[in-house]
Amino acid sequence: MSFNCRFAPSPTGPLHIGGVRTALFNWLLAKKNKGKFFLRIEDTDKERSKEEFKKQIISSLAWLGIEHDGEEYIQSKNIKKHITIAEELLKKGFAYKCYCSEQEINEQKEKCKKQGIPYIYNRKWRDAKDLQVPKDVQPVIRFKSKISGNTIIKDLVQGERNISNSTIEDFVILRKDKSPTYQLSATVDDHEMKITHVIRGDDHMINSFKQKQIYDAMGWEVPEFAHIPLIHSEQGKKLSKRDNASTLDDYIKIGIIPDALRNYLLRLGWSHKDKEIFTKQESIDLFDLNGVGKSPSKLDMSRILSINETYIKTINEKDLFKFFKEYVSKYKTSIDQSKEEILIKSMGFLKNKGKTLEDIWNNSQYIIKDKVEIGAEDKKLIDDLSKTIIKDFKSEYEKLSSLSRETLEPVIKSLIDKHKTNFKGVGQPLRITLVGSRFGPGLYDVILSLDKSEVLKRLKSI
RNA sequence: GGUCCCAUCGUCUAUCGGUUAGGACACAUGGUUUUCAUCCAUGAAAGAGGGGUUCGAUUCCCCUUGGGACCGCCA
């Protein structure tokens, strides 16, 4: 059995986190089964589709490490074919022209609203041989939905789904301007692309029932469907653009790294025993639709942060720096070339102090900025004794011929003894002097990460 | 409102009729530590309610309740 999967976003906005998960699941299913994963840009809404969003979607998937097979498929390029199919359906009697004006439709909707009954197109033109065709109305083509009986879909996630055909309206497949609608285009393209498995959000359930009728009418093989539960906001509602953490960029912005997000999204609605951390390869090997749950899941920021922290800790310094550099240049400032080496070296201890790339950015300010700014609260902690300690440390430090934790430790210890204090008494003023804050990386890490001349310069400034 | 769907700790989830209902995040407490963290240990925390079926239900069925999705000439 072949597995052809696809992710088919519309380029009408930045990539949604739910969309990312849909893409991930499709990609995973394809890779797991040695199949293909295609990307189809559904840009038939001319008004809202934007080239920049198309580019953003492609780069977003690339960021996550989800690569699609072949060129991306641009739906608008296949419009002619869609129209041909609409005409074929018309000819075969599976569709009909509807001359209702928009006004007429709107009036119907209003009426239904008033009466409190659900609107469904009244199928006025379905079998209207004796109706007078109005000259001033451009017709739309509607699909002749089944009126009786039921449609059943054996959904790979939801199980058997059954709906009464009478609830499916005669949906439009070709607009009055002769452009195809989603229902038509998606079906035709899925067929042409030989898609075997359609994984999409649960909100598409009704579309699958509609589209199944098109497949049946055309005598095409119906793909397998898997409708995955939606991701809800922390408020428990379908994620919308208004939610502040709804797009992929929202996560990149705070310094989440690709593997962490991939892992988080994988575990949102899917599980494999008690396993929490999955490498990319493991996720491919272990993924299956059986593991997908049926109930929607809420986004949990602290969980994302925690997984990100796990990944940051395990990644090696060089790779982490690559992510860091990319992140900083995109959202902060560019890093001075001269600082790169010291930053790479420092990733080793910096990564233990943060959950995100942004945390690392904050903790590495003492390296990136040449001037130390001491906060008011911290300044208060520098008293006369502190100044003496700093001075004493400076003269000892200056004398050291080799710098290491081993050579530094005796110096600090002797200062503790000399001034009858503890480590904090010595460490705190030194950290404030060197970093600008009483919080920060370990003292030895700080001292050893900076150049000797830089350390002396900072010590002198007190 | 109509149609469809969902229901285990606060959150993500394990359990596929018999478990002291497990794990992870978050939370609390204690310990290590050089500040903040990390790390380690411990703790608190769940089967929505009511009926069945069964020797036995979190698990199967029904009802109630709660929540969600869809109802476009958007995708």
Image (tube, coloured by chain):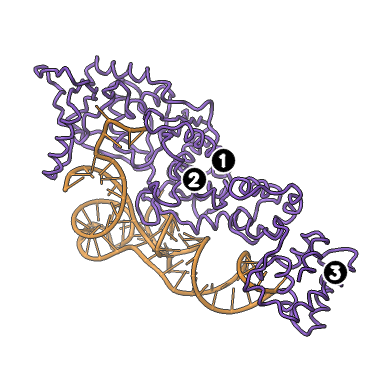
Chain colours: A purple, B orange
Identify the residue shown where x is 53% and y is 54%. A276
Q: Are the residues flagged by discs 3 and 1 in contact, CB closer than 8 Å?
A: no
Could you tell me which secondary element the residue under label 2 belongs to?
Answer: helix
Q: CB of mark 3 within 8 Å of CB of mark 2?
A: no
Residue shown at 73%/69% (left/top)? A433
Q: Earlier in the sequence, mark 3 or mark 1?
A: 1
Q: How many neighbours does mark 1 have within 10 angstroms: few (below 14), some (14-19), or many (20 or more)? A: some
Can you tell which mark lies on residue A248? 2
Distance between the alpha carbons at the discs numbered 3 and 1: 45 Å
Picture layout, residue A125 above or below residue A400: above
Whether labels 3 and 1 share one chain: yes
Residue A264 numbered tag = none
Same chain assignment for discs 1 and 2 = yes
Q: Amino acid at mark 2?
A: Leu
Provide the secondary structure element on which disc 1 rests: helix
Distance Cα–Cα, label 1 vs label 2? 10 Å
Identify the residue at horizontal 34%, vertical 52% (top origin): A237
State which tag comes first along the sequence, 3 or 2. Answer: 2
Give the residue pinned by disc 3: A397
Helix, strand or loop at disc 3?
Answer: helix
